[in-house]
Image (tube, rainbow, N blue to C red):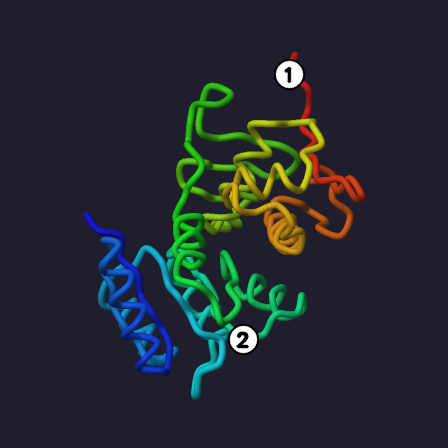
């Protein structure tokens, strides 16, 4: 079955070019010219990935991204002419998996699409698909964080990042290794991606995210998931 991609841009010419190129690479493409229409299309049919322009009339890209993330697990790539770290962090905070600056080449965009669609292999670990540490339990099969009566769902990229930590516990993992393991070999310098996603994970797995006990920062090097040593 073809991977389904929703292209959201208010420029008809950009949508036409995207549709032709993506279809030529085997993707099934749906178009939307606004954030509002994108939400309508997502309500009609599931999508695997959304290419979402930031600057659109009406509901802007960031607002649309937040709304999409509430009800969809599709990968989201934001497309924008803005290229400051602040803009990237805003897009990732809104729920995007990646961020591509215009103008971009189609080979670059296709590589980013492949990276956004890739998923960590879910192999058996610790004899099951649930794991508890601290005050929370992680349901890997359901991609849920359970803290008492509270259940929080992990986004696909949050899940992939946490899974990599869990399968490499109590070891400082360098930024580049994390980026290449979770996003792909084309990545390595996008440290701001990790900063945003680590903060999101801490809000879900730490009782006090500002004073983490498990997901720790090793300044200038990387991050470490501190788990009890198994006896």
**Which mark sits nearer the N-terminus, 1 or 2?**
2
Residue 88, picture quadrant: bottom right
Q: Nearer the viewer, mark 1 or mark 2?
A: 2
For the view shown, which residue lies furthest in the top direction? Answer: 231
User: Which residue occupies 65% across, 50% down?
Assistant: 189
Residue 149: % across, % down: 52, 47
Q: Determine whether 148 is above or below 195 in the image.
A: above
Crowd rating for badge 1 (residues with CA inside 10 Å; few <14, some 14–19, many 20+): few
Q: Which quadrant is the C terminus positioned in?
A: top right
Residue 65: % across, % down: 46, 69
Instruction: Give the side of residue 128 with respect to residue 132, left or right.
Output: left
Crowd rating for badge 2 (residues with CA inside 10 Å; few <14, some 14–19, many 20+): some
User: Which residue occupies 55% across, 36% down?
Assistant: 137
Viewer-nearest residue: 212 or 60: 60
**Residue 125, label in figure:** none
Instruction: Give the side of residue 82 with respect to residue 143, left or right.
Output: right
**Residue 230, label in figure:** 1
Viewer-nearest residue: 94 or 144: 94
Q: Determine whether 12 is above or below 122 in the image.
A: below
User: Which residue occupies 80% across, 43% down?
Assistant: 219
The secondary structure type at the circle numbered 1 is loop
Q: How many marks?
A: 2
Is any atom of residue 203 visible in this view? no
The secondary structure type at the circle numbered 2 is loop
Which residue is the site of mark 2? 81
Residue 177, picture quadrant: top right
Viewer-nearest residue: 139 or 116: 116
Does the CB distance between marks 1 and 2 fall below 8 Å?
A: no
Viewer-nearest residue: 210 or 170: 170
Residue 112: % across, % down: 45, 54
Is any atom of residue 18 visible in this view? yes
How far is the residue under mark 1 from the one under mark 2? 49 Å
């Amino acid at each position: 079955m073809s991977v389904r991609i929703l292209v959201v841009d208010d420029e008809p010419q950009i949508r036409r070019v995207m549709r032709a190129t993506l279809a030529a690479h085997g993707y099934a493409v749906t178009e939307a010219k606004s954030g509002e229409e994108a939400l309508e299309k997502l309500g009609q049919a599931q999508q695997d990935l959304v290419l979402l322009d930031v600057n659109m009339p009406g509901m802007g890209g960031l607002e649309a991204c937040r709304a999409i993330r509430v009800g969809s697990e599709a990968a989201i790539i934001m497309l924008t002419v803005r290229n400051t770290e602040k803009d990237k962090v805003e897009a990732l905070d809104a729920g995007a998996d990646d961020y591509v600056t215009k103008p971009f080449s189609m080979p670059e965009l296709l590589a980013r699409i492949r990276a956004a669609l890739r998923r960590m292999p879910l192999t058996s670990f610790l004899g099951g698909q649930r794991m508890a540490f601290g005050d929370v339990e992680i349901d890997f099969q359901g991609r849920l964080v359970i803290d008492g009566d509270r259940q929080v769902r992990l986004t696909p990229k949050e899940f992939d990042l946490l899974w990599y930590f869990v399968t490499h516990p109590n070891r400082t993992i360098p930024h580049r290794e994390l980026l290449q393991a979770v996003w792909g070999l084309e990545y390595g310098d996008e440290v701001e991606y990790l900063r945003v996603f680590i903060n999101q994970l801490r809000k879900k797995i730490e009782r006090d995210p500002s004073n983490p006990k498990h997901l720790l920062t090793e300044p200038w090097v990387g991050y470490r998931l501190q788990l009890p040593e198994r006896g």
